[in-house]
Amino acid sequence: MAEVVVIGSANVDHVVEIEHRPVDGETILGSDLTFTPGGKGANQAVAAGLLGGAVAFIGCVGADSSGDLLVGSLAGAGVDLSGTVRVGGPTGVAIIMLTPDGENSIIVAPGANRQVTPEVVAGNEVLLADARVVVAQLEIPLESVVEAVWYAPGARLVLNAAPAAPLPAELLAECNPLVVNESEAASLLGDGAPEDGAGLAAALLELGARSVVVTMGAAGAFVAETGGDPVHVAAAEVEAVDTTGAGDAFVGALAVRLAEGSGLAEAASFASRVAGIAVTKRGAQSSYPSRAELK
Ligand code: RIB
C-alpha cells in the first residue's frame, strides 16, 4: 500500500547550458541539449521512492519515447505506477536554461499533464483513500488537485504551490504544509508581502494554511506552525552545480519523513540535507540520493 501518493506533472527536461540568459532579440550558443526525466510531480515521487517511501504516482505521460523515459525512472525508484496513465498526445516537456552559477530558468509545455483531469483522480479513489500523505504541485489542472484532496480526507496534504497560482481558500486550509519558495510566497501574498522568510511563513499561516515551509535555497527554510514562531532550518553548505529539481527533492523527502511520523521541523531538516545533495549533481531525478547515501 502506498503511504505517499504524489499527484502531478511528468516532463522530459530539455537542458541547455549557457553562459548568460539571452536578452530580447539576442541569439547565443549553448551546450548540446540533454534529455533527462523531470517534472515537479515525477521528481517528487522519485525522490520519495529513492528514500525508501512506499510511493505511488498519479499522472499522465504520452505513449511516446519520452513517456518511456519517465516511466522507467519512476519504476527504477520503486514507485507504484498503477495511477500513471499513458495518453494520446505528447509527454510534457520542460525547456531548461542552466547558467554557470547552477541557477536555471524553466518553460514548461504541459502536453499530457493537461490530461490529469478530475476523472483520472476519481479513477484512483482507492490509492488516495489509503494514503497517509498526499503530495501535489500546480503543473496539472488545479481542479484535479482539489479533487485529489477531496478523495483523501484522512491524508496529510503537502502542497508545493509551484508554479505560483491563486489558491482557493478551502484548498489553502488543507495545506499541512504549504511549501513555497520566496517568490511563490510573495506572489500568493500580493502587495505588501514581507521581505524575509520568517515573515513570509508567518503571513501564509495567517492567510489560512495549516502549516507552511518557505524554502530559500542556500539560506535554508522557515517552518511555521500554529501557536509558535517560525523556525529556521539551515541548508547544507555545499557548492551548487545545478539547482534544477532541488526543491522537488526537498518536497519528496519531507513527505517521506512526515509519513514516517516525524514533526514538520525535523522533516524539513531531513529534506534540507537531501536537497543539499541534489544541488551538487546535474539534472533533477539523476541528482537524488538513496536513503543509504544519507548515512
Ligand atoms: O522543479 C524542476 C522541474 O520543473 C523540472 O524537472 C521541470 O520539468 C519542471 O517541471
Image: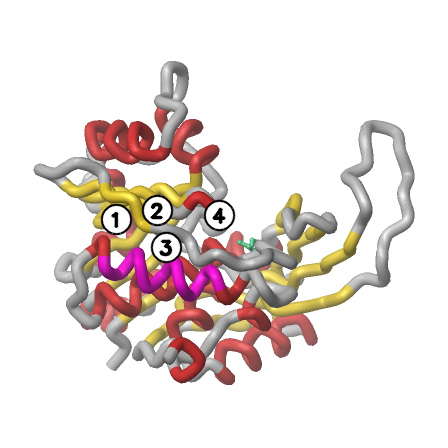
Mark 4 or 2: in front is 4
Image quarter where the N terminus lies is bottom left
Mark 1 residue element: strand
Of mark 3 and mark 1, the one earlier in the sequence is: 3
Q: Which mark is residue 218?
A: 4
Proximity of marks 1 and 2: CB atoms separated by less than 8 Å? yes
Proximity of marks 3 and 4: CB atoms separated by less than 8 Å? no
Q: CA distance from mark 3 to mark 1?
A: 11 Å
Which residues are drawn in magenta?
Answer: 266-276
Give residue 97's position: percent from left, percent from top. Answer: 72, 49
Q: Which mark is residue 154?
A: none
Q: CA distance from mark 3 to mark 4?
A: 24 Å
Q: Residues within 10 Å of mark 2 (few under 14, many from 20)?
A: many
Name the image quarter holding residue 190.
top left
Residue 249 lies in magenta, yes or no? Answer: no
- Image quarter for ligand 1 equals bottom right
Q: Which mark is residue 136?
A: 3
Of mark 3 and mark 4, the one earlier in the sequence is: 3
Residue holding disc 2: 179
Residue holding disc 1: 177
